[in-house]
Amino acid sequence: MNNYILFSDFFLDDKVLIHFLKKNKFKLTIFPAEFCLVDKNKEKQFDLLEKFKQIITNKGPQNNIILSAGPIEMLAFFINNISLELKCNISNILLMGGSFDGGNITEYAEYNLYKNPKAFQDLIKTKLPISLFCLNSTRDLYVRKLDYEKTKDKTLKELLKKFENLNFKHKASLNDLILYSYIVNPLNFSSFEKNIDIILEGEKKGMLIDGPYKLRVKSIIDKEKFYKIFEDSY
């Protein structure tokens, strides 16, 4: 049994992601992605840390899979404040973020990693298994390509219509839904290992570069199959 732990900034595409995970009865716990979402309240942060520890304490055959769909701040804080034994209970971290060929918040950086590049660097230093889903794979997964007008799912329809109406220079890409797509159809993704690092400050803050930290980069093979997952749910 897989136990999914989602770190979310609760933006519209995250709400669609949460909707699908709950609709399909995935075992799911949700945490805020940033300290600011808990008002930088240290007591609250450590309360959430204790909750996280309890969740990843294995009680029987389960895989603890982390989904990171927002800035890395809270996730890195949790990982750096748990024991090695508990870290071993994390089977994978599926992380939407970063780019190797241009960003969406600056010319060089993707939003999630730009917000706190040091937190991302701290995370990749842990050598935990990380699968990275970059803008390279998501930048042309547009809301407008989903024929959601046909859906009887009112929640999905309303969220996607709101999302499509936002004026983004990256055309309302369905970035975070790539995590759900991977969960339900991992065979539609290619994978390769890459050694990376991240620029921490300056004009190119948040940019991914070659470096000493190994992770896996995932890319969609057939983008039409991505849309079909959501269209089939209608």
Image (tube, rainbow, N blue to C red):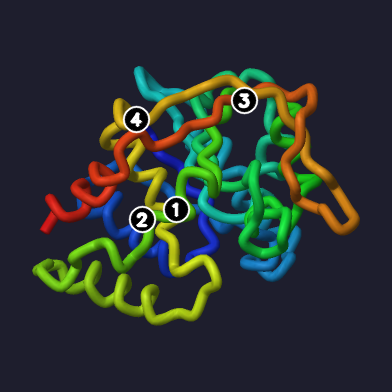
Q: Could you say whether the residue bearing mark 2 is in a helix, strand or loop?
A: helix
Q: CA distance from mark 1 to mark 3?
A: 19 Å
- Check disc 4 and report its element: helix, strand or loop: strand
The residue depicted at 54 percent of the width and 62 percent of the height is: 9
Distance of label 4 from label 1 (alpha carbons): 19 Å
**Residue corresponding to mark 3:** 215
The span from disc 2 to disc 1 (Cα, nearest Å) is: 7 Å
Residue 152 in view here: yes
- Sequence-first disc among 4 and 3: 4
Tell which circle, 2 or 3, labels the residue nearer the N-terminal end. 2
Q: Which residue is mark 1?
A: 176
Q: Amino acid at mark 2?
A: Leu
Q: Mark 2 or mark 1: which comes first in sequence?
A: 2
Q: Which residue is mark 2?
A: 17
At label 3, which amino acid type do we have?
Leu
Determine the secondary structure under disc 1: loop
Q: Is residue 92 left or right of residue 214?
A: left
Are the residues flagged by discs 2 and 1 in contact, CB closer than 8 Å?
Answer: yes
Q: Return the mark for residue 2.
A: 4
Q: Residue 59: percent from the left, percent from the top?
A: 41, 23
Circle 3 Cα neighbour tier, 10 Å, few/some/many (<14 / 14–19 / ≥20): some
Q: Is residue 169 above or below residue 84?
A: below
Residue placed at 25% from the left, 51% from the top? 227
Q: Which is in the foreground here, disc 2 or disc 3?
A: 3
